[in-house]
Image (spheres, rainbow, N blue to C red):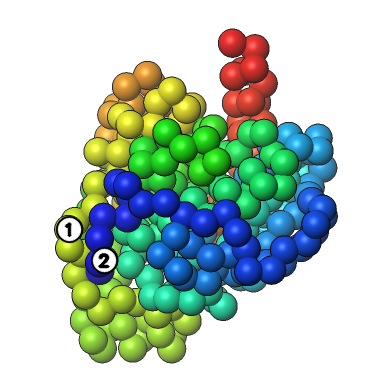
Amino acid sequence: MSSGPAGRAARSSVQPLTRAQSPVRQRVTLRTQDGVAIEAAYEPGQGAPGGTAIVLAHGFSGAVDRPHVRRIAAVFAQRAAVITFSFRGHGASGGHSTVGDREVLDVAAAVEWARSLGHAHVVTVGFSMGGSVVLRHGASHRGRMEARADAVVAVSAPARWFYRGTAPMRRLHWIVTRPAGRVVGRFGLRTRIHPHEWDPVPLSPVESVPLIAPAPLLVVHGTRDPYFPVDHPRMLAAAAREGAELWLEEGMGHAEHAVSDELAGRIAAWATASWTSATAD
């Protein structure tokens, strides 16, 4: 599903197609390094000006204006500024979904936008597919100040590619890999999916985790996730070179829909505290 290895040496553009001059609530269109137009929104939130910004990376078939994404963003905004965006192939963004490959460029563009608005501390928080993307982004962009994440949170993320061990994942693979499935994705899920297989296969989430350090990493997963069983988050946490926090949430299902306001608040608190800890060190 790719014309090249997005997460290894690619760069993304900080320049939005439209931009306000001050960090106030705004909607813009960002342009990624490979030329895809990405819709994005900024909420100043209740954090300190220039402090933490949370970049929220939604799951497959989500978008910036979906109610479950807006709910999580509203909770995050109680503690920090929040940038939401629609991955390529989703919502009003251009392009086609590559289901976790070139989406790292979408995250990079959002992080660069946060830096351009004056935020000194940027935390990426991804859900499901978005979780795999922020892990890969954290590994591939750690050397670029303007595009790197200062901390990473992966919620309900897979550890490895091509997993088909649950019925929901088998259905998702049918949607992604079959022509009829992609029609269902386009009209039923409002998601435009790239028709080609990955070439090359991108670095997997569990292979990416060791490369994220020294940035703090938080892995959040539900014990009743119908997509990915708990061996996935345990693999991710175990792969971290300098250790990662693992929150196994009892009874929680999958991704944004399953994250309570209380849990979202705890994630936002961890995101802002990760800056306090870094500056204290």
> Regarding mark 1 in the picture, which secondary structure is present there?
loop
Q: Which residue occupies 17% across, 63% down?
A: 199
Residue 202, horizontal then vertical, whole percent:
24, 53
Q: What residue is drawn where x is 38% and y is 75%?
A: 96
- The answer to which of 259 and 127 lies nearer the viewer is 127
- 227 relative to 64 in the view: left or right: left
Image quadrant holding the N terminus, namely bottom left
Residue at the spot 48% in from the left edge and 62% down from the top edge: 32
Which circle marks residue 2 in the picture?
2
Quarter of the image where one finds residue 99: bottom left
Report the quarter where the C terminus lies.
top right
Q: Nearer the viewer, residue 112 or 179?
A: 112
Residue highlighted by disc 1: 200
The residue positioned farthest toward the top in the image shown: 281
Q: Amino acid at mark 2?
A: Ser
Whether tag 1 and tag 2 are in contact, CB under 8 A, the answer is yes
- Above or below, 51 relative to 43: above
